[in-house]
Amino acid sequence: MLKLWFMDQKIQYLNQMIEIIDNKVTIFKKNKSKLPQAAYTAEKQVLTRTIQDTIQLAEEIKPVPFSLINDLKSLIKQL
């Protein structure tokens, strides 16, 4: 029973992270041409790390959401 609770918590956290990533990436893509190079690089690095952490979390969920993981990996390449 406790194991199911932890899995539910991970799924909730994953959903929250996806929502945050979606919002942040949308803003980043919209404004990246206006950002100074240093800010662009820093923001891209933060987004990439956040997406990588989210991929790690997704890999802990059973069954593993492979399509989501692939989408996140593609998103990193699009930044």
Image: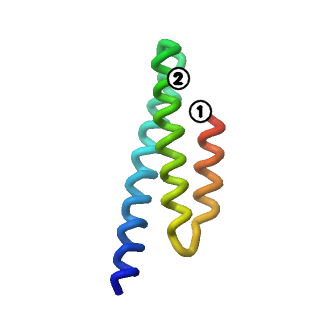
Name the disc covering residue 41, or none. 2
39 sits left or right of 6 in the view: right
Q: Which residue is drawn at 34% across and 82% down?
A: 2
Q: In which quarter of the image is the C terminus?
A: top right
Residue 63, by quadrant, is bottom right
Q: Which residue is drawn at 53% across and 56% down?
A: 56
Residue 14, by quadrant, is bottom left
Inspect the image, locate mark 2, and give the three-letter code of the amino acid beneath it: Thr
Q: What element carries label 2?
A: helix
6 sits left or right of 18 in the view: left
Q: Residue 8: horizontal and vertical position, in percent?
A: 38, 73
Which scheme is used to colour this image of the protein? rainbow
Q: Nearer the viewer, residue 13 or 28?
A: 13
Measure the alpha-carbon separation of dots 1 and 2.
Answer: 10 Å
Pointer 1: what residue?
79
Q: Residue 22: horizontal and vertical position, in percent?
A: 47, 44
Q: Residue at x 50, y 41 (%)?
A: 49
The image shows residue 42, relative to residue 18, as above or below, that is above
23 sits left or right of 2 in the view: right
